[in-house]
Amino acid sequence: MFLGTHTPRLDEKGRLILPAKFRDELAGGVVITKGQDRCLYVFPTPEFHRIADQLRAQPMTNKAARAYSRVFFASAHDEVPDKQGRVTIPSHLRTYAALDRDLVVIGASTRVEIWDRTAWESYLADSEDDFADIEEGVLPGGL
């Protein structure tokens, strides 16, 4: 499970050093793709395959599943982190998420998310006030 918030920087070659506490689980390979809210999702390869299987199980007549699958798979980039735990974020993904030098990398349970630092701070400021009201619909039965 991925947890926590980290603030790495993107180097001049578009590489990100993954947070040390995530490296062991991601060492076997990652898939980076467009996420929702203009961030990037980083999945360990087995988790990406699990999600791919779920999407493949949807009927091709499901318009929303087709649209989601197209963006999800067409933007996906797979690679194995190097010995320093670095991954390259392709330019089309950096553009999509408006990534500059300063990033925020968060653990989001089964995935890692990469955000532009300013975008993350804005998102967090907008959503923290609603956080207390969300629990009932998201966690059936509550905490």
Image: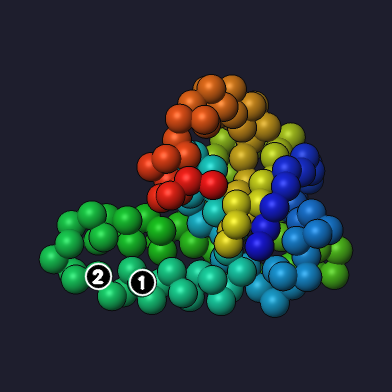
Q: Amino acid at mark 2?
A: Gln
Q: Position of residue 29 (x, y in %)?
A: 66, 73
Near-viewer residue (53 or 86): 53
Q: Compared to 138, does 90 lie above or below? A: below
Which quarter of the figure is the N terminus placed in?
bottom right
Give the residue at the far left of this rendering.
Answer: 61
Residue at point 32% right, 56% down? 68
The amino acid at mark 1 is Gln
| Colouring style | rainbow
Residue 37 placement (x, y as % from top left): 47, 38
Rendered image: mark on residue 54: 1
Residue positioned 62% across, 40% down in the render: 115
Q: Mark 2 to mark 1: distance in Å?
A: 7 Å
Q: Is residue 61 positioned above or below 99 on the image?
A: below
Query: Dots 2 and 1: beta carbons under 8 Å?
Result: yes
Q: Residues within 10 Å of mark 1 (few under 14, many from 20)?
A: few
Q: Nearer the viewer, residue 4 or 91?
A: 4
Label 2: which residue?
Answer: 58
Q: Residue at x 85, y 70 (%)?
A: 83
